[in-house]
Amino acid sequence: MTTTMPRDFIGYADHAPHPRWPGDARIAINFALNIEEGAEYSPLDGDPLTDTALTEGVGMDTGIRGRDLSAESMYEYGSRVGVWRLMRLFGERNMPVTAFACAQALERNPPLVRALRAAGHDICCHGWRWEKPWLLDEATEADHISRAQESIERLLGEKITGWCSRYGPGMNTRRLVAQAGIPYDSDSSNDELPYWTRVEGRPHLVVPYSLVTNDCKLVPGGLPSSDDFFMLLRDAFDQLYEEGADAPRMMTVGVHPRMAGHPGRARGLARFLDHVLAHERVWVCRRVEIARHWIAHFPPDGSEVAA
């Protein structure tokens, strides 16, 4: 039995700290723009099959065991069209996002790198490739983390500030991320506030992610329309905003260019962005800002720092 990733069923329980978000915000909301296109499994990169995850072909039995040209084109839509539509939606509303970006995807899309730099969006690295870390041996995973760090620093002129694996970490991931000096990870979905854990005896920050308020719900067989997506996001926001009068929390909205970047789905996201903007005391922020706020005001020794 392993104890390298112990489970915690209690967390903050009924005494979660008041986060004291900037501006006395009732909610902190972060939009995670997942940039994976070009980093997915592909026979062109030595993999046996084309990745079909979060595409219109999910669940379709094509019988293709090598390159699936249809699925490849769906990924290409995300980087050719969808990401630019989403960037416009956020840009028109002057709303920051965090790029959950795979380094290899950025390597293959220089115009997007330039746009991310110009907009000042932060990077929560989504891996060297969009791969399943639990399938990697420790040496390979450590090498991929190092390659991602070098690549993103070279492309964007900044260090990785966070890490989020595909579908969660492997048994070695958090330790390797901490050893690499990456300040936080989002490889957990178990809370609505950041929290500290310990890795090799040292404190390590976790800024939880969500697969609920996420456009992965739009895959075929999921939510049928942009109205459904909007209502899911709106209701989550409204519930947290109401609770935020006394107990503010954070909300993460994950979007993918090849999913929410399609016109009909983008309308649901746009309606939600406008819904957010119609409320006062909302902190729409980059993910690194949440991490820095927590480090500054809730250090791992357990003492709170006055605002």
Image (spheres, helix red, strand yellow):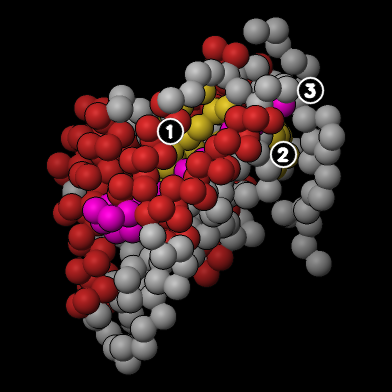
Q: Earlier in the sequence, mark 1 or mark 2?
A: 2
What is the magenta range? 247-265
Res 159 quadrant in image: top left
Q: Residue 209 magenta-drawn?
A: no
Above/below status of 37 relative to 219: above
Task: Name the amino acid type tagged 3.
Answer: Gly
The residue that disc 1 covers is 275
Residue 24 pos. (x, y %): 60, 14
10 Å crowding of disc 3: few (<14), some (14-19), many (20+) = few
Above/below status of 197 relative to 282: below
Identify the mark at residue 197; answer none if there is no mark. 2
Q: Residue 258 magenta-drawn?
A: yes
Residue 72 pos. (x, y %): 23, 71
Task: Name the amino acid type tagged 1.
Answer: His
Q: Earlier in the sequence, mark 3 or mark 2?
A: 2
Of circles 1 and 3, the one toward us is: 1
Split into 4 quadrants, where in the image is the C terminus? top right
Residue at the (59%, 60%) spot, across then down: 170
Q: Work out whether residue 201 or residue 217 is closer to the camera in this orientation and state it.
A: 217
Identify the mark at residue 302; answer none if there is no mark. 3
Identify the mark at residue 36; answer none if there is no mark. none
Residue at the (72%, 54%) spot, across then down: 5
Task: Name the amino acid type tagged 2.
Answer: Thr
Q: Secondary structure at mark 1?
A: helix
10 Å crowding of disc 2: few (<14), some (14-19), many (20+) = some
